[in-house]
Amino acid sequence: SDAVAQGLRARGIPCEVAPRADKFGKQIKYADRRGIPFVWFPSEDGDTVKDIRSGEQVGADTQTWSPPDTDLWPLLVAANDDKGAS
């Protein structure tokens, strides 16, 4: 939901809202195609977040949940420069 995204963005966590309220399976496929590792599921019983790589799903709220630092920002790696190597 937009409220969840707003709460996460306020804490510096980049996120997207699915363009349509499709079934969860379609939302997970959408996230996977976009390279998004986590999917947030709002519920009246309490929100959960699923790591689509491992399948782990945990309870979460926008004030405390945060992905691991390695998932917050892309890791840039310099390409090896083999020019001049003997």
Image: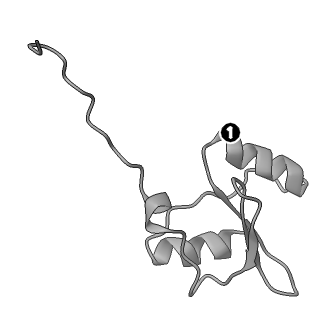
Name the spot of residue 9 as percent of width and height, x first.
50, 71
Q: Is 49 situated left or right of 44 in this image?
A: left
Q: Is 73 situated left or right of 42 in this image?
A: left
Instruction: Please tell me whether residue 74 is drawn above or below residue 8 in the rendered image.
Output: above
Name which residue lies at 50% across and 59% down. Answer: 71
Residue receiving disc 1:
33
Farthest right residue in view = 23
Image quadrant occupied by the N terminus: bottom right
Q: Is 12 situated left or right of 82 in this image?
A: right
Name the spot of residue 73 as percent of width and height, x first.
42, 56
Instruction: Please tell me whether residue 40 is drawn above or below residue 36 in the rendered image.
Output: below
Front-lying residue, 28 or 68 = 68
Instruction: Please tell me whether residue 60 is drawn above or below residue 77 in the rendered image.
Output: below
Res. 42 image quadrant? bottom right
Amino acid on which disc 1 is placed: Arg
Image quadrant occupied by the C terminus: top left
Instruction: Please tell me whether residue 24 is drawn above or below residue 9 in the rendered image.
Output: above
Total marks shown come to 1
Name which residue lies at 74% across and 44% down. Answer: 30
Viewer can see residue 26: yes
Name which residue lies at 26% across and 35% down. Answer: 78
Name which residue lies at 87% across and 85% down. Answer: 44
Q: Helix or strand or loop: what does disc 1 sit on?
A: helix
Name the spot of residue 70 as percent of width and height, x first.
45, 60
Viewer can see residue 22: no
